[in-house]
Image (cartoon, rainbow, N blue to C red):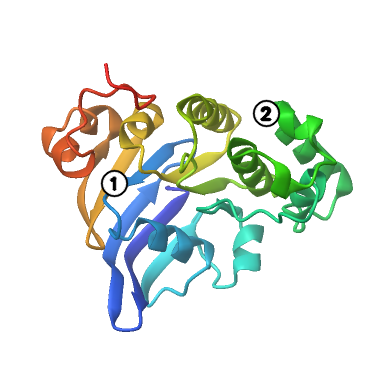
Amino acid sequence: MALLEVKNLTVSYGPLKAVRGIDLEVEEGQIVALLGSNGAGKSSTLKAICGAVPRSGGSIQIAGKALARSPHEIVRQGIALSPEGRQIFAGLSVEDNLWAGAYVIKNRRDALRSLERVYGMFPVLKEREKQQAGTLSGGEQQMLAIGRALMSSPRLLLLDEPSLGLAPLIIESIFRALKQIRQEGTTILIVEQNALMTLEIADFAYVLELGTVSMKGPASSLIHEESLIDAYLGGKKNQTASGQKE
């Protein structure tokens, strides 16, 4: 049984249909990528899964149970989002931002365990724990956004453009952390413009076009798909994972 099962999902913004009846599955323990050009419906799909926007049709199940509509209940069901643009609480400390992500955890010991996990994964956050989050670098803020999502100990972590606006070395650090998160048992569904690098760490990928699934398959196969490279990677097949030309 898939951890996440999405059937015939539609998302509309007034008369505009951003997602047009897509199906997707995420198996437990996988990293699954949602790829495609801007406006393809990738972020809308993530937002519908986490309850940030209402779905106008279709069904979503998590671990075989119908997904709630309320974002708070969805977090309690084991799904957490690290949003595009990070959206940290700039005026709060790093530590307070992280504790904000643990609001569904009733046992303080469990919350402390999550905090230590995040600090172990991103040691710079421990060094900056009393620092105002808005003064962090872009890369540190992205680590904080991911760490905040991990504080609820989700079974499924949703990531929306985690490399956006970051330098290549920081991106490599973030992607190493994603592999570690998966190795520690958290399943990942990621939307990411850096498609080549994402396919290198993913198990499976879906390509969206105008709100529909135009291509899907094992990431190891899609990374060699010429039509995918030409259409969605801008023909950049001679780039390395770090985004530098060979």
In the rendered structure, which disc, 2 or 1, sits on the residue that comes first in sequence?
A: 2
Q: State whether residue 244 is above or below residue 105.
A: above
- The amino acid type, in three-letter code, at marker 2 is Met
* Mark 2 vs mark 1: in front: 2
SS at badge 1: strand
- The amino acid type, in three-letter code, at marker 1 is Tyr
Residue 199 rendering spot, x and y as whole percentages? 33, 32
User: Would you identify the image quadrant in which residue 90 lies?
Assistant: bottom right
Q: Which mark is residue 52?
A: none
| Residue for badge 2 | 121
User: Would you identify the image quadrant in which residue 73 lies?
Assistant: bottom right
115 to the left or right of 6: right
| Residue for badge 1 | 206
Residue 83 rendering spot, x and y as whole percentages? 54, 54
Q: Quadrant of the C terminus?
A: top left
1 to the left or right of 134: left
Residue 212 rendering spot, x and y as whole percentages? 23, 60
